[in-house]
Image: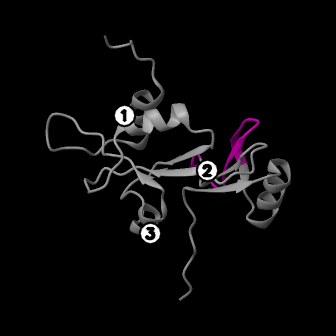
Amino acid sequence: MSQTLQLGHFGLRTRNLPAAIEWYAKALNTHVQFQNELAAFMSFDEEHHRFVLWDDGETGEKPVIVATSARRGQNRASFVALRDMLNKETRPFLILFGTGWGLTETILLQSDYVLEAVEGRGDYNHLSVRSAAAIILDRLLGRREKQE
């Protein structure tokens, strides 16, 4: 019995977004679910997206890769430290959000940083990826009043 290969939730960097969209649409029979000038979320079914193509703009620089995980671990970057890096660093950042069981250990090891887990008051720390992404983006990019 043959096994069907399934793809899900990965990103590919391109320097020519329109050409990449056209190629993947033909090669994998996919369609664009959402697109703006920098990225296209593509799927071959009704999922919001199975993968994203993104154009890193004119920099051509490798982005700083930041993985997220609900799992606790050592050597995690704090929200404060990453927020400072985002404000000071000129290179682009790519933040990877896992779904379901999270990102693989290989992805975590290949990332430049792994962000600390979002934690609440109790031991339960499993949020939907949309909820986790909203909290993380607010902690990293949200407006903050200056502390005196």
Q: Is residue 20 left or right of residue 46?
A: right
- Checking the image for residue 34, the label placed there is none
Task: Tell me, yes or no, whether the highlighted magenta stretch contains residue 43.
Answer: yes
Instruction: Determine which residue is flagged by label 3.
Output: 106
> Quarter of the image holding residue 75?
bottom left
Instruction: Determine which residue is flagged by label 1.
Output: 80
Residue drawn at x 62%, y 43% as measured from the top left:
92
Mark in the foreground, 3 or 2: 2
Residue drawn at x 48%, y 59% as measured from the top left:
111
Q: Tell me which numbered mark, 1 or 3, is placed earlier along the sequence.
A: 1
Instruction: Determine which residue is flagged by label 2.
Output: 63
What number of labels is visible?
Answer: 3
Q: Are marks 1 and 3 in contact (CB under 8 Å)?
A: no
Inspect the image, locate mark 3, and give the three-letter code of the amino acid beneath it.
Answer: Thr
Residue drawn at x 76%, y 60% as measured from the top left:
24
Q: Tell me which numbered mark, 1 or 2, is placed earlier along the sequence.
A: 2
Q: Which residues are magenta?
A: 32-48
